[in-house]
Image (tube, rainbow, N blue to C red):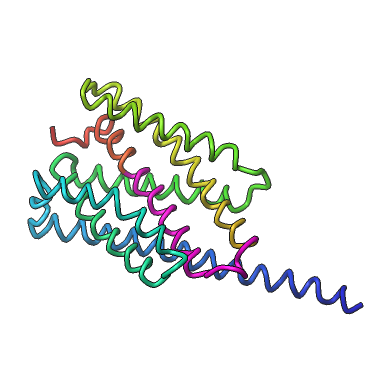
Amino acid sequence: MNNYEQQPRETINTQVGLNRFLTKMFGWMGLAVLVSALTAYLMVTNGSASMMRGGGMLVGLIVWFILPFVISAQSMKRPTVAFGGLMVYAVITGAVISSYAFVYTGAAMAQAFVSSAAVFLTMSVIGLTTKRDLSRIGTQATAALIGLIVAMVINLFLRSPMISLIFSFIAVIIFSALTAWDTQKMQKLYLQYGDQVSVTGLAVTGALQLYLDFVNLFLQLLQIIGIFGGGSRD
């Protein structure tokens, strides 16, 4: 009888802990998106976005690519430092995105933001609720992303707008799949190791991964909308 009563209680406690973890992870991810959006808006409205052209853009991009690895390395060792790093990264991302105001209209950027939010929320819900193991899909999407990055680098020399557009569509599919996989993966990691590692560190890790998925969805959808929706300033 004691075992019968203990099992439901443990199940309830696990579900409560999971809900708290997911709330923290998505909350921090949402905060990072808000910080980026606010940074980009402020830089555009006060004219600071012009600093992200030329050398400023190069420095910003270098830090933009390197910092996620630093945050991931510190997330389980120093969760507070990693969280601070996530917020700094959100500011840098917002600064980089502000430079897109010279290429795309405000309406196009707003439409891309709403579209990426809709795709992100849909795929996150799928990742949380599906009974199917998405590990294989996630592995394939990761491999496809590596191949796509190589192809994008090659296209920098070819400078083909059509190829670039096709790559954007492929990237949207890849990051949509990664959003669902990352959501499911973080949920599983908490259920398996939540009582053995720092939950805060795990939440920072998940928030960073999902934030990167969202930002990349936004950038790719922005390019697509800029072409088909007439939102480009060119």
Left or right: where 135 falls relative to 11? left
Residue at horizontal 22%, vertical 47%? 61
> Looking at the rendering, in which quadrant would you find the C terminus?
top left
**Which quadrant holds residue 155?**
top left
**Farthest-out residue, right:** 1
Q: Above or below — where is 192 with respect to 232?
A: below
Q: Above or below — where is 6 with respect to 209?
A: below
Residue toward you, 93 or 46? 93
Question: Residue 27, how many percent across, how many down?
Answer: 44, 65
Q: Above or below — where is 50 with respect to 150?
A: below
Question: Residue 231, how many percent across, how many down?
Answer: 21, 37
**Which quadrant holds residue 162?**
top left
Task: Give the mark count.
Answer: 0
> Looking at the rendering, in which quadrant would you find the N terminus?
bottom right
Left or right: where 36 falls relative to 130? left
Residue span colored magenta: 192-218
Residue toward you, 161 or 192? 192
Left or right: where 47 falls relative to 64? left
Residue toward you, 199 or 45? 199
Q: Is residue 161 magenta?
A: no
Residue at horizontal 71%, vertical 72%? 12
Residue at horizontal 81%, vertical 76%? 6
Residue toward you, 34 or 82? 82
Question: Residue 23, how many percent across, how many down?
Answer: 51, 67
Q: Main secondary structure of the magenta part?
A: helix
Residue at horizontal 19%, vertical 51%? 60
Question: Residue 100, how many percent across, how many down?
Answer: 19, 44
